[in-house]
Amino acid sequence: MKGQSGVEYLTTYGWAIFVLLIIIAVIVSSGVLTPNYLISEECAFGNNLKCNLALVNTGGQSKLTLELFNGFPYKISVKSIDIQTEDGTQRFIFPITAPINVSSGAIQTYNGSLSGPPVPEGATKRFRGNITYYSCAPELGPACSNVTHSITGRIIAKVIPQ
């Protein structure tokens, strides 16, 4: 009798459980349940280049202030910073005309402006980035190396309301 009642239960309510699972899968995959307010800001370019950021809208444009901490045991010379949206449609323009030397343990601040429309106030946006630099390790001689190195990373930022 117990087996028969189990089979009857599954045949009676099994389709309802199946439909419920499909509805939950559709809701989760559509992103309706993605709580942006729970996503914390992140700036990750590895252990040797720690960073802090601030994303603000001023003058109808989104601006990113990026602080890089040189955790390498030697000086580096930052050649370029390329940060763009995940879909690659917009990028921050950092006006670096010549490589900027950053001593070991020092913090350097960079300011960039987002091309295109600004990020809405209070919105959370994901970016990917690439920092290109020259190594100035003492083993390489008194000057910095001519070989560029790249570190890729990701940024999750929320626009700070003003």
Image (cartoon, rainbow, N blue to C red):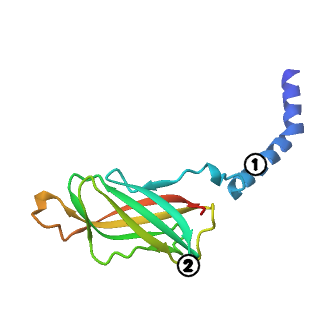
Name the image quarter holding the C terminus. bottom right
Amino acid type shown at disc 2: Gly
State the residue position of label 2: 116
State the residue position of label 1: 24
Q: Determine the secondary structure under disc 2.
A: loop
Place of residue 30 in the rendered image (x, y in percent of width and height, measured from the top left): 71, 58
Residue found 27% across the figure and 76% down from its top? 98
Q: Are marks 1 and 2 in contact (CB under 8 Å)?
A: no
How many residues crowd around disc 1 within 10 Å: few (fewer than 14), some, or many (20 or more)? few
Amino acid type shown at disc 1: Ile
Q: Is residue 128 left or right of residue 47?
A: right
Residue found 40% across the figure and 56% down from its top? 51
How many residues crowd around disc 2 within 10 Å: few (fewer than 14), some, or many (20 or more)? few
Residue found 85% across the figure and 21% down from its top? 2
Place of residue 22 in the rendered image (x, y in percent of width and height, measured from the top left): 77, 50
Rounded to the nearest angstrom, the CA distance separating label 1 from label 2 is 36 Å
Q: Is residue 132 left or right of residue 29?
A: left
Residue found 19% across the figure and 71% down from its top? 146
Q: Quadrant of residue 123?
A: bottom right
**131 or 65: nearer the eye?**
65
Place of residue 120 in the rendered image (x, y in percent of width and height, measured from the top left): 63, 67
Q: Is residue 72 above or below residue 126?
A: above
